[in-house]
């Protein structure tokens, strides 16, 4: 069985925060810190959901998303994009590339957990 959530984030404090809140919500988590590593990890064993930062070293989140959507194996992988506050253009580009959901930094923990839960189809505890 694969992991539930792969986090692609290069900022240590944000990565630590995401890892903590998603594990606390009960999911198995792995993380990578650059765009190349995302593609390698997803090809090896796709997660149920990818939480993808736009600003990553080696390859941007947009590059990664473009590649995932171009590949039949990963085309349907649910992707949650993390964008910086006020970057409307990032959101538009991500939508055009096929992102499934968005969270703007700074985000609330419940916002991230809710978005991941929705992408996973885990409605446990939801009214």
Image: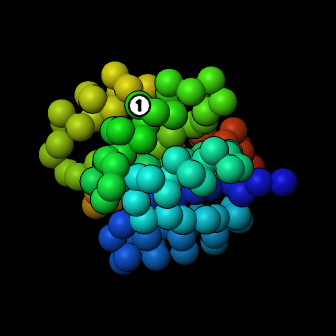
Q: Is residue 125 visible?
A: no
Say which of 113 and 94 sits in front: 94
User: Could you tell me which residue is drawn at 64 percent across and 64 percent down?
Assistant: 29
The chosen color scheme is: rainbow
> Residue 95 at what x, y percent from top left?
35, 27
Give neighbour class at mark 1: few <14, some 14-19, many 20+ (Cα, 10 Å).
some
Say which of 17 and 58 sits in front: 58
Circle 1 residue: 66
Q: Is residue 118 visible?
A: yes
Please identify the quadrant where the C terminus is shown: top right
Q: Is residue 17 above or below residue 6?
A: below
User: Could you tell me which residue is drawn at 34 percent across and 49 percent down?
Assistant: 59
Please identify the quadrant where the N terminus is shown: bottom right
- Quadrant housing residue 33: bottom left
Q: In this view, does 23 lie above or below 100?
A: below
Marks counted in the figure total 1
> Residue 3 at what x, y percent from top left?
72, 57
Say which of 63 and 127 sits in front: 63
| Horizontal relation, residue 89 to residue 12: left or right | left
| Horizontal relation, residue 116 to residue 28: left or right | left
> Residue 36 at what x, y percent from top left?
44, 53
Q: Is residue 73 above or below residue 86?
A: above
Give the SS element for disc 1. helix
User: Could you tell me which residue is drawn at 56 percent across and 51 percent down?
Assistant: 40
> Residue 72 at what x, y percent from top left?
62, 23
User: Could you tell me which residue is drawn at 63 percent across and 69 percent down?
Assistant: 23
Q: Is residue 98 above or below residue 102?
A: above
């Amino acid at each position: 069985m694969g992991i539930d959530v792969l986090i692609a984030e290069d900022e240590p404090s944000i990565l630590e925060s995401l890892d903590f809140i998603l594990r606390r919500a009960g999911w198995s988590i792995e993380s990578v810190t650059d765009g190349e590593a995302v593609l390698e990890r997803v090809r090896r064993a796709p997660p149920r959901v990818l939480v993808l930062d736009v600003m990553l070293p080696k390859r941007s989140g947009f590059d990664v998303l473009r590649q995932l959507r171009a590949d039949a194996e990963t085309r349907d992988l649910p992707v949650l994009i993390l964008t910086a506050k006020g970057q409307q253009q990032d959101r538009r580009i991500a939508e055009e590339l096929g992102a499934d959901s968005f969270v703007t930094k700074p985000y609330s923990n419940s916002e991230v957990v809710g978005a991941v839960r929705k992408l996973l189809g885990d409605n446990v505890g939801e009214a």
